Amino acid sequence: MIKIAIFASGSGSNFENIVNHVQKGDLLGIEVTALYTDKAGVKCIERAEKLNIPVHINQPKDFISKSSYEQHLLKLLSNEGVQWIVLAGYMRLVGEDLLHAYEGRMLNIHPSLLPKYKGLDAIGQAFESGDSVTGSTVHYVDSGMDTGEIIEQQQCDIRTDDTKEDLEERVKNLEYELYPRVIAKIIK
Ligand code: GAR
């Protein structure tokens, strides 16, 4: 079994989708040890509880530095034997400590066709752009924001009559197919 930890900061629908795939037997050989979140009171915690997945809530503001926050996470990850980290809406730059320990073994998903529309509200940025297509990208994590080596992208249309909510739903649905597929391909 390859043990993965999923990091999320908000809703956690990608987290839930990945766990559903694992629990249905669609991601053979992969075990999700826990959800790691950097925020108290967020929806991903509720989802994890319903799915019977352990949760670690660690808020960087409760640590003296980013390094001590990440060193604490590294102890938890090591105790659980985590081999890969999967970021799924973890809205924070990963620091040197985690990067060093998990270099080449950390994935992220970002809701745009990178290198376009990095950072916050990528779907809103695409919606406002006048582009006729957007999509989502899975990439390795490096020290930049949404800058690591691209593994795979999937695209969808932006229709002229779309609301931003329509586009968000289309991109999310695409992510629910893309991320498990790339996880199955890369995490072995
Ligand atoms: C996802 O769309 C993911 O691509 C994005 O956050 C959303 C999380 O949704 N990630 C980023 O923007 C990373 N820069 P979820 O909490 O419902 O899975």
Image: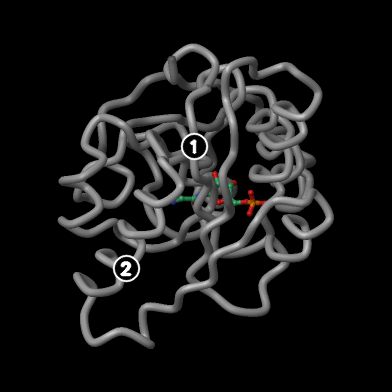
Find the residue positioned furthest to the front: 79
Nearest the viewer among 120 and 3 is 3
Q: SS class of the residue under badge 1?
A: strand
The type of residue carrying mark 2 is His
Earlier sequence position, callout 1 versus callout 2: 1
Q: Is residue 103 left or right of residue 165?
A: left
Quadrant position of the C terminus in the picture: top left
| Identity of the residue drawn at 77% across and 34% down | 20
| Identity of the residue drawn at 47% across and 22% down | 153
Residue topped by disc 2: 72
Residue topped by disc 1: 4
Asked which quadrant contains residue 25, the reply is: top right
| Identity of the residue drawn at 35% across and 49% down | 78
Nearest the viewer among 172 and 95 is 95
Q: Is residue 121 above or below residue 188?
A: below
Q: Residues within 10 Å of mark 1 (few under 14, many from 20)?
A: many
The type of residue carrying mark 1 is Ile
Q: Is residue 15 left or right of residue 66?
A: right
Q: Is mark 2 within 8 Å of ligand 1?
A: no
Instruction: Identify the mark at residue 93; answer none if there is no mark.
Output: none
Q: Is residue 99 left or right of residue 87?
A: left
Nearest the viewer among 183 and 148 is 183
Q: Whole-Å distance between the Cαs marked 1 and 2?
A: 17 Å
Coloring basis for residues: one colour
Q: SS class of the residue under badge 2?
A: helix
Q: Position of residue 170 (x, y in %)?
A: 73, 35
Asked which quadrant contains residue 32, the reply is: top right
